[in-house]
Image: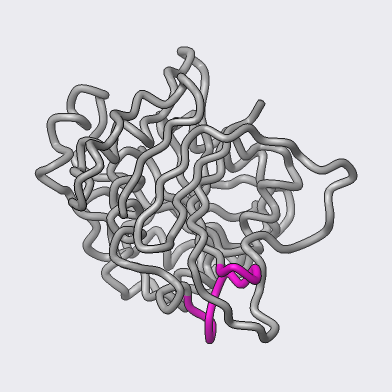
Amino acid sequence: MRRLFPVTDQTPARSQDGADREWSLDELADAYAYPALAADGHWLRANMVSTLDGAAQHEGRSQPISGDTDMRIFGTLRALADVVVVGAETVRQEGYRPARAREAFAARREAAGQGPAPAIAVVTASMDLDFSLPLFTSPLVPTLVVTGAAAPSDRVAGAKAAGAEVVVAGEGAAVDAARAVRELAARGLRRQLTEGGPRLLGQFVAADVLDELCLTISPTLTAGGAQRIAGGPSVTVPHRLAPACVLEEAGFLFTSYRRI
């Protein structure tokens, strides 16, 4: 059974007709549309998947707990974004490649004043990245590397030589999460999507700059010691979000919660 339940009027999603059919990409894009932004505004959303018992990964990767519809939503969220922000460890583990242009979203992106595909922004303090990978050497849109001012100079030079744009968002080696959001927005990348990993998402949560969480709840159990969707130090006061929409298919729940 497939159902789409808009929870608030902020989500301009069309109700399903009850038929057992695949959601169209237009329906998904409407359900997950970014809110209207002020001239100087930006919006950071996260897209994560979790098992019923709270695991964000199985054997170090998210793919085993995902599914076909989850991947369609993953692609839709990317197609709506100006930039996809991801941690270096996730780039290494998940084998990240450049985002691609998708004809199904071309008109929507053009109407929103966006380029053909989102940029990928890799957050790293150590700059321990393989700059010979296609993510850096042959992206449709130049990849950004977000790091601190004290990052190793030889690695910074290597990133630039590979064609990446280096964004400084911290006074030391570490990246300041709030500053990273601002620096990307200052470059016109205002519709922001982070795909983790858990350490990076935890930094955004701790900095209180996360505006929306798109969470897929996988109908699986893994036990073990896998990470949650967000890691790092606990916040002093839990951040409360409001539900925006819930979708269900084959036991998976696809939820969206927004900043109140």
Q: Residue furthest top?
A: 39
Vertical side of 20 occupied by 256: above or below:
above
Decide: is 176 above or below 134.
above
Above or below, 22 against 243 in this view is below
Query: Seen in the image, is 22 located left or right of residue 180?
Result: left
Q: Is residue 227 magenta?
A: no
Q: Quadrant of residue 28?
A: top left
Quarter of the image for the C terminus: give it.
Answer: top right
Residue in the image at 20% along x and 46% along y = 19
Residue 58 part of the magenta segment: yes
Q: Which residues are magenta?
A: 51-61
In this view, the residue farthest toward the right is 236
The chief SS type of the magenta part is: loop
Figure quadrant of residue 173: bottom right
* Residue at 19% over, 40% down: 116
Q: Position of residue 243 (x, y in %)?
A: 57, 35
Of residue 185 and residue 195, the one placed in the foreground of this image is 195
Q: Position of residue 13 (x, y in %)?
A: 33, 29
Q: Position of residue 23 (x, y in %)?
A: 22, 46
Q: Is residue 249 left or right of residue 112?
A: right
Where does the image place residue 71, in percent across and percent down from the top left? 32, 61
